[in-house]
Amino acid sequence: MSTELSRQYRLDPADERSREEKMAADERSREEKMTADERSPLCAADIDEAARRIAGVVTQTPLQFSDRLSDITGAQVYLKREDLQAVRSYKLRGAYNLLMQLGAEETAAGVVCSSAGNHAQGFALACRSMGIRGRVYVPAKTPKQKRSRIRYHGGDFIDLIVGGKTYDMAAQAALDDVARTGATLVPPYDDLRTMAGQGTIAVEILEQLGGEPDLVIVPVGGGGCISGMTTYFAERTTATSVLGAEPAGAASVVAALAGGTPVTLDHVDQFVDGAAVARVGTLPFAVLSAAGDMVSMTTVDEGAVCTAMLDLYQNEGIIAEPAGALSVAALLDADIEPGSTVVCLISGGNNDVSRYGEVLERSLVHLGLKHYFLVDFPQEPGALRRFLDDVLGPNDDITLFEYVKRNNRETGEALVGIELASASDLEGLLERMQASECHIELLEPGSPTYRYLT
């Protein structure tokens, strides 16, 4: 594996084609080969080698028993805490394993990645740990907090470069760099070395558990982590199943498995940013499509992800990013066998605290505890008081009220947000609204007006 793969992105000096043409040809060749070959391109021995290779740099993160989730499901539920990794995500594993396999000429030429998130931080720390010069291309919209974390982990070994307005532009800038300089590209998921490194999580789970789990639930973006872990469990266990959890707004693996080939999604919801991938990697898809019944996929509503994030924080004290909470959200919606042993991967904890207002809002909407209405009030004294007395229940709370008086009209519309103590209180609220003198419209989630609010 190592000789062939270490040359994967290196230009053959005898080849007269441009670097861009060769990279495109190699990618097409790889896709054709993987489509025709039903065997997995990765094996457990690769992952065992990766585990030995990254030992001493990558933290062996805790496997934590969850009393709460075990009580809810009736299973023995463990949390694999990759949010406690050195860069607060599992991405260091793949980046470090790849860099460790580069030759002297490749390391001298430098390494390149494009990322605005966890992969960039893992890449940066791996570069600093090995003393390799690296360049990280980020889109212009990358928050200062993320830029500072990349610089912190990489130190003087990393150059942070704005590669354009969008991620696609940054990714293209990274490819242009590779073509121009001969540097090695370090992909976040579509590389066997990356996949093997990320698969070392499975090695630790078996060691720490001291036996075989019945089910492992893995957050899924580009597919590198789940494909590496699936490969290991397939060869090293007898009956472990893997459940991949994708955000409903970015289900590229589900679409690929349904269509029999990787497809590019027309639209990707960016809320679960750590898993917001428009197209599954070619190599991960080859592994997953060859895994058969051992692997299944599910999609998780973004509101359920937010609820899982808040529950993890309030109960276990775990600060999970949206992608990191995908596994727990999927667990609570899955048909879990009582008494079984389940491991949920908390894949990362790089969360911006400024997002928690939106997280809480989405969770309340998901739980049916928050609703928005357009209320057409009579423009006369006492109308608001009558609305409060006649419509609101004793435990209902107005969280939003926007109203502008129109002097030349008999009625005026107000936007009203109401938070309920229980989702079952909605029926009574709607009945009181129906009997009210006001014309009231419930805004449906997903409507243009509703999306503006949330």
Image (cartoon, grey):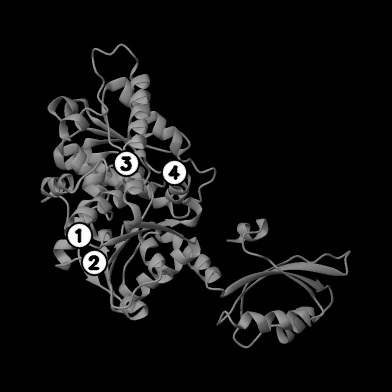
Q: Position of residue 145 (x, y in %)?
A: 37, 50
Judge the density around disc 1: few (<14), some (14-19), many (≥20) Cα neighbours within 10 Å: some
Considering the numbered disc 2 on the image, is that residue within a helix, a strand or a loop?
loop
Work out whether residue 231 or residue 368 is closer to the camera in this orientation and state it.
Answer: 231
Q: Residue at x 55, y 69 (%)?
A: 365
Q: Amino acid at mark 4?
A: Gly
Q: Which mark is residue 260?
A: 4
Left or right, 430 with respect to 323, comes to right
SS state under label 1: loop
Mark 1 = which residue? 237
The number of discs equals: 4
| Nearer to us: label 4 or label 2 | 4
- Using the numbered discs, state the Cα–Cα distance from disc 4 to disc 2 in whole angstroms: 29 Å
Residue 124 in view, yes or no:
no
Q: Nearer the viewer, residue 15 or 321?
A: 15
- Mark 1 or 2, closer to the camera: 1
Three-letter code for the amino acid on which mark 3 is drawn: Glu
Question: Where residue 247 appears, x then y in whole percent?
Answer: 45, 56
Graded by Cα atoms within 10 Å as few (under 14), some (14 to 19) or many (20 or more), the crowding at tag 4 reads: few
Q: Nearer the viewer, mark 2 or mark 3?
A: 3
Say the numbered circle drawn on residue 213: 2
